[in-house]
Image (tube, rainbow, N blue to C red):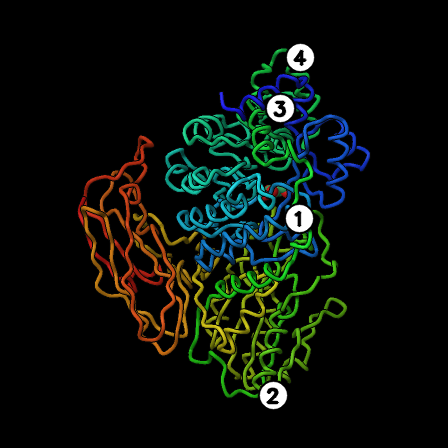
């Protein structure tokens, strides 16, 4: 037996049943009184969530002084340690996904881990491996978008960044692959609702990102709220034990999402009471229960009455203790990075660099980059509201909503970014929200329209709001608010060119706005420096390189309209609109132009080569995407699937031979027997800077 196992087994052998059960419980600090929290710490509870800094250290002191196993502190640091006012607020996961840059995502996670550790905490409930394939869902903003390959690549990088070389290192924290599984695929995109997928579909589309998480030795996995084909994930032993732990070899521990045990009783009606729900949760392979305090006495009762064998508890507790040991917590309960790392200059600079890679330019009739303009009118409620640049899971939204919190510098809103650069170019800038609501009447602020009439170009900033995005905030409609649409119509009447900037948690259905705009760009919720990066693109100080990780629909009725759809739709169209989205996955313009040529594929070695050339006038970065299609397969397979991408920076006129090496698994499918195989037959490979087929270079090969 390894040294570690001996230490853990010895520790376990000294624990009472109550202590073992306490280790399996995570208490939400903001939902109990201070006295109750102290009591749980004294009792040897396994973990707390949503406690910061000094209060965490105070609880740890109580646990250690009472001879208990050190506490594990978890937090939702999902795009920086944003529940701490002074931490670095990076772009959201969906915004970061526009960079297609695993290396920078890894650096961001490493910086976030340091800031979480500097706060005396040990674990982040991140990354999200759910797929954002139906953007009516309130939590698309937390995903890496619609594609399993991109989600797997960026999620793996994030885990490596959080967990570092060794978990015991000062700045390393536990990562958490969530929400297992199929959470974003619920019918009607309804949060925590039932997902009607078979095991075959789950293995084909939703398991691959979690396989990447296990490959990266992710320390924890979080059980989703929902259910698969009517069986709650919380009680799905096939999923949690047989597939995740036994088949994939996951050796960390599984934590439920917030009160999954309670959800089983009062929402899903799959359990009568806490006794039954706790028994089902333990037996199915959940090792730690988040929030559900009633779990403690019910689990004690289950063991006392013999309904649960103590050996089943041991399995869960061993996993939890092993992670605490790996983290170095058993030897050093107060391990933490230097507090000066929170919001430090190095992380701020990293944030600026990463954010610049997240801007996606989607329309440009030549208006961009701005030149020889003297007067700019910035109009719109999103232009100067930093809360909208930050998005969800910051101190404005969690652990309890606080929209009136005072934002902490540094940050740069779009308006500030435009003002800063306009000064450099001797341009004048006016700003107006565009409307105000007086006695429930929508009043256009005439000065906004007059300023627009007086300007040579208008920058219209629009997007969604805190009330329209996040957990439990799914939408049946995806257009801009009435007030923003009306302001835009007034701006159109001025006949001035309009550059529309979308500052939003996800794509919105804005075809008319795109059509009447000369330029259209976004970075979704770009964090502290989203406004600055957008302004730099508008003024030409930054050549945009971002690509869409999620499709932009014309209309909510098209949902879902992800790029890797299956064939077989009769007529391939609605009677009242096209099936294609307004902007496709992988799309994004540059101020230069790239060309692909000379594609070759060796069907023996499975090596692809293609030449990429910058045929424009300025240096630019191109995200090359490689897709494939299995032309005839024993089950339906997508019309195209992303299997590789790379990012190249090329000077004007420079060219580069790109080489991609594949294995059979890259071209595989999950057949009707749930086996992953590469079948014989013809395959098509497609390469380019978008998923739009007509813009791709293609070649065929036979297996
Ligand atoms: C929430 C979310 C989950 C989060 C957890 C702790 O309800 O579903 O993503 O990590 O609770 O805050």
| Percent x, y of residue 197 | 43, 37
Mark 1 or mark 4, earlier in chain: 1
Q: Nearer the viewer, residue 79 or 682?
A: 79
CB under 8 Å between discs 1 and 4? no
Say which element carries label 3. helix
* CA separation in Å, label 2 and label 1: 50 Å
Local packing at callout 4 (Cα closer than 10 Å; few below 14, some 14-19, many 20+) is few
Relative depth, front residue between 453 and 365: 365
- Looking at the image, in which quadrant does ligand 1 appear? top right
Q: Position of residue 99 (x, y in %)?
A: 46, 60
Mark 4 lies on residue: 304
Give the CA distance from mark 2 to mark 4.
79 Å
> Given contact means CB atoms under 8 Å apart, are the residues at marks 2 and 4 in contact?
no
Q: Tell me whether the residue at label 3 lies in contact with that at label 2, contact meaning CB atoms closer than 8 angstroms.
A: no
Q: Which residue is mark 2?
A: 454
- Sequence-earlier tag: 3 or 4: 3
Q: Which residue is mark 3?
A: 278
For marks 3 and 2, the one nearer the N-term is 3
Classed neighbour count for the residue bearing mark 1: other residues with Cα under 10 Å, few (<14), some (14–19), many (≥20) = many
Per the rendering, the mark at residue 118 is 1
Q: Residues within 10 Å of mark 3 (few under 14, many from 20)?
A: many
Q: Secondary structure at mark 2?
A: helix
**Residue 23, image quadrant:** top right
How far apart marks 1 and 3 lie (CA) works out to: 35 Å
Q: Is residue 461 left or right of residue 251?
A: right
Judged left or right of residue 602, residue 144 is: right
**Label 1 secondary element:** helix
Closest to the camera, between mark 2 and mark 1, is 1
Q: Residue at x 64, y 40 (%)?
A: 74
Q: Is residue 55 left or right of residue 313?
A: right
Q: Which mark is on residue 343?
A: none
Residues under labels 3 and 4: Cα distance? 14 Å
């Amino acid at each position: 037996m390894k040294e570690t196992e001996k230490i853990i087994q010895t520790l376990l052998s000294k624990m009472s049943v109550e202590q073992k059960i306490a280790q399996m419980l995570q208490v939400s600090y903001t939902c109990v009184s201070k006295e109750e929290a102290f009591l749980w710490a004294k009792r040897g509870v396994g973990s707390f969530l949503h406690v910061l800094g000094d209060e965490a250290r105070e609880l740890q002191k109580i646990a250690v002084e009472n001879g208990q196993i050190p506490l594990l502190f978890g937090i939702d640091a999902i795009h920086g340690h944003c529940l701490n006012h002074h931490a670095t607020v990076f772009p959201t996961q969906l915004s970061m996904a526009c960079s297609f840059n695993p290396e920078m995502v890894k650096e961001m996670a490493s910086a976030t881990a340091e800031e979480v550790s500097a706060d005396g905490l040990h674990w982040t409930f991140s990354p999200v491996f759910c797929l954002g394939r139906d953007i009516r869902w309130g939590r698309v903003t937390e995903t890496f978008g619609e594609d399993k390959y991109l989600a797997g690549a960026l999620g793996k990088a994030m885990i490596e960044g959080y967990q570092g070389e060794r978990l015991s290192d000062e700045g390393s924290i536990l990562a958490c692959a969530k929400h297992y599984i199929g959470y974003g695929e619920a019918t009607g995109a309804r949060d925590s609702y039932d997902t009607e997928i078979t095991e075959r579909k789950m293995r084909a589309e939703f398991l691959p990102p979690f396989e990447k998480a296990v490959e990266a030795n992710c320390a924890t996995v979080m059980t989703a709220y929902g259910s698969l084909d009517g069986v709650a994930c919380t009680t799905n032993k096939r999923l949690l034990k047989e597939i995740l732990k036994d088949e994939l070899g996951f050796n960390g521990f599984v934590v439920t999402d917030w009160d999954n045990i309670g959800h089983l009783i009062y929402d899903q009606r799959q359990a009568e009471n806490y006794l039954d729900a706790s028994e089902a949760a333990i037996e199915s392979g959940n090792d730690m229960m988040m929030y559900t305090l009633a779990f403690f006495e019910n689990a004690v009762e289950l063991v006392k009455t013999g309904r649960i064998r103590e050996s089943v508890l041991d399995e869960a507790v061993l996993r939890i203790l092993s992670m605490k040991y790996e983290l170095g917590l058993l030897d050093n309960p107060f391990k933490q990075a230097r507090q000066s790392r929170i919001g430090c200059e190095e992380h701020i600079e990293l944030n600026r660099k990463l954010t610049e890679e997240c801007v996606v330019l989607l329309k440009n009739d030549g208006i961009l980059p701005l030149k020889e303009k003297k007067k700019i009118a910035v109009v719109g409620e999103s232009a100067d509201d930093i809360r909208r640049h930050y998005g969800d899971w910051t101190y404005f939204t969690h652990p309890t909503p606080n929209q009136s919190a005072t934002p902490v510098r540094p940050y740069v809103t779009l308006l500030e970014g435009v003002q800063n650069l306009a000064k450099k170019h001797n341009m004048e800038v006016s700003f107006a929200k565009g409307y105000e609501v007086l006695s429930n009447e929508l009043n256009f602020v005439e000065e906004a329209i007059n300023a627009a009439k007086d300007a040579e170009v208008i920058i219209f900033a629009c997007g969604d709001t805190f009330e329209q995005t996040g957990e439990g905030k799914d939408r049946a409609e995806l257009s801009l608010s009435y007030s923003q649409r009306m302001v835009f119509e007034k701006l159109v009447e001025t006949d001035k060119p309009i550059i529309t900037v979308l500052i939003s948690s996800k794509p919105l259905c804005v075809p008319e706005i795109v059509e009447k705009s000369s330029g259209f760009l976004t970075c979704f919720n770009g964090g502290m420096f989203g406004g600055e990066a957008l302004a730099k693109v508008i003024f030409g100080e930054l050549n945009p390189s971002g690509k869409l990780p999620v499709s932009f629909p014309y209309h909510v009725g098209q949902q879902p309209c992800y790029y890797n759809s299956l064939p077989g739709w009769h007529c391939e169209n609605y009677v009242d609109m096209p099936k294609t989205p307004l902007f496709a996955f992988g799309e994004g313009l540059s101020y230069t132009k790239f060309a692909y040529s000379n594609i070759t594929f060796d069907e023996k070695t499975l090596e692809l080569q293609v030449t990429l050339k910058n045929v424009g006038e300025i240096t630019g970065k191109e995200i090359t995407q490689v897709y494939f299609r299995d032309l005839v397969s024993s089950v339906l397979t997508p019309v195209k699937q992303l299997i590789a991408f790379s990012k190249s920076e090329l000077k004007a006129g420079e060219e580069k031979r790109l080489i991609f090496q594949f294995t059979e698994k890259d071209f595989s499918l999950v057949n009707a027997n749930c086996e992953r195989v590469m079948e014989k037959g013809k395959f098509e490979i497609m390469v380019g800077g978008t998923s739009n087929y007509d813009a791709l270079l293609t070649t065929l090969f036979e297996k």
